[in-house]
Amino acid sequence: MPTYASQTFARRIAQLEHKHATLKEGAVTVLRDDGLMVMEPQRPNVRRHLLALAIFLLACLIYKAATYAGLGPQAYSAKVEMLANGTLPETMLAHIFVVDPVTETLVAHLSQAYAAAEMRALTLYEALATRFWVQG
């Protein structure tokens, strides 16, 4: 029959093994108030992963809208239909690239922004042309 001391020792060993297993996954050194440096398990940064996922999804949505705006509705629909008739991964992509209301709204905003930028560039070009090239 194990004694109290051996049970306490076994429990401490189990705690140390658990701590070492968690420290293998990542650790950070912390300086305590008494001046002792202690290794503590590093907590996973969930916010960073969620932010990266959100940025990736936004970039995919912008890519989809830019492709739709660049090709036009008929050509884009034809490309998506070609994907839908392909292999399994192509069919999955076709389901993702189907035009939805969010994409149409984003295309409308991109078109307005492009038209405004084009107008500003044209106005700037005309101003420079009249000032520097046309002298008369």
Image: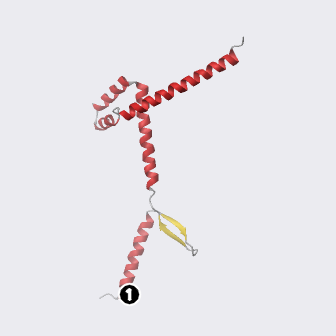
Residue 72 position by quadrant: top left
Q: Position of residue 11 (x, y in %)?
A: 37, 79
Q: Identify residue for label 1.
A: 5
Q: What's the residue at 53%, 26% (across, down)?
A: 116
| Closest to the observer, 37 or 32 | 32
Is disc 1 surrounded by few (<14), some (14 to 19) or many (20+) residues within 10 Å? Answer: few
Q: On the rendered structure, is 87 left or right of 122?
A: left
Question: Is 57 placed above or below 84 here?
Answer: below
Q: On the rendered structure, is 98 left or right of 124?
A: left
Residue 18 position by quadrant: bottom left
Image quadrant holding the N terminus, namely bottom left
Image quadrant holding the C terminus, namely top right
Question: Is 23 placed above or below 123 here?
Answer: below
> Mark 1: which secondary structure?
helix
Q: What's the residue at 32%, 87% (across, down)?
A: 2
| Closest to the observer, 61 or 123 | 123
Q: Amino acid at mark 1?
A: Ala
Q: What's the residue at 62%, 21% (across, down)?
A: 125
Q: What's the residue at 48%, 68% (across, down)?
A: 40
Q: Position of residue 97 (x, y in %)?
A: 35, 34
Question: Is 37 placed above or below 84 here?
Answer: below
Q: Position of residue 85 (x, y in %)?
A: 27, 30
| Closest to the observer, 11 or 100 | 100
